[in-house]
Amino acid sequence: MTETKIFARLQADHDRHRELLERIDATRGDGDERRYLFEAFRVDVTAHAASEEMSLYATMLANPDLRDAAQHSVAEHKEIEDYLTALYETDFSSTGWLTRFRTMKKRYLHHIDEEEEEMFPAAEKGLPDAKKRELIRIFETEKPKEKARAAEEEPSSEDARA
Ligand SMILES: [Fe+2]
Ligand SMILES: [Fe+2]
């Protein structure tokens, strides 16, 4: 069904993120691989979350029955973004990096499991089919732009406070 395409598309991203998390978790601190894989993860997750907010969550926020679930997810996006910035700013070869990474990993896995088990089924049930078809179009249009933007930017905790 075309209407369900948006949820399959979002889940495909999640599956790629799960795979990257496992690969990063297995890296040692003394090579470029950790930095390379983390950057791939950071850019894709940042773009995924931004595009998810512009499509699915913007629509859910406008629906009184779905608003609370959407607000919960958007708050978690902010939490994950802060973790990603902290990791970006931490020495990749330090033991503290992997400890912080594993905290972020646990939170992110919680986030995407919850989206798949609660938010997506609620939206699947609560949104009209025409709206769901529109969401996949918005997501596919925005994600490449958001990816380019995330790859260019230097995450900074200074900016976040400003
Ligand atoms: Fe999300
Ligand atoms: Fe997601």
Image (cartoon, rainbow, N blue to C red):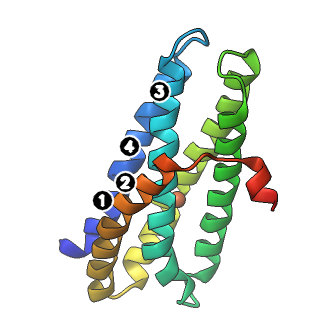
Q: Residue 8, which numbered label?
A: 1
Is residue 76 shown left or right of residue 113? right
| Tag 3 residue | 36
Residue 157 percent location from the top left of the image: 76, 48
Q: Which of marks 3 and 2 precedes in the sequence?
A: 2
> Separation of disc 2 and disc 3 at Cα?
23 Å
Amino acid tagged 2: Gln
Classify mark 2: residues with Cα within 10 Å, few (<14), some (14-19) or many (20+).
some
Q: Residue 89, which numbered label?
A: none
Q: Marks 3 and 1: in contact by CB < 8 Å?
A: no
Amino acid tagged 4: Asp
Quadrant of residue 99 in the image? top right
Residue 42 percent location from the top left of the image: 52, 42
| Tag 4 residue | 15
Residue at coordinates 47% horizontally, 83% vertically from top-left? 59
> Separation of disc 2 and disc 1 at Cα?
5 Å
Residue 44 percent location from the top left of the image: 44, 47
Q: Marks 2 and 4: in contact by CB < 8 Å?
A: yes
Which of the two discs, 2 and 3, sits closer to the camera?
Answer: 3
Residue at coordinates 64% horizontally, 43% vertically from top-left? 84
Q: Callout 4: helix, strand or loop?
A: helix
Residue at coordinates 34% horizontally, 76% vertically from top-left? 135
Q: Which of marks 3 and 4 precedes in the sequence?
A: 4
Classify mark 1: residues with Cα within 10 Å, few (<14), some (14-19) or many (20+).
some
> Separation of disc 4 and disc 3 at Cα?
19 Å
Q: How many labels does the image show?
A: 4
Q: Looking at the picture, does residue 65 appear above or below residue 51? A: below
Residue 113 seen in the figure? no
Q: Callout 3: helix, strand or loop?
A: helix
Residue at coordinates 34% horizontally, 64% vertically from top-left? 7
Which of the two discs, 4 and 3, sits closer to the camera?
Answer: 3
| Tag 2 residue | 11
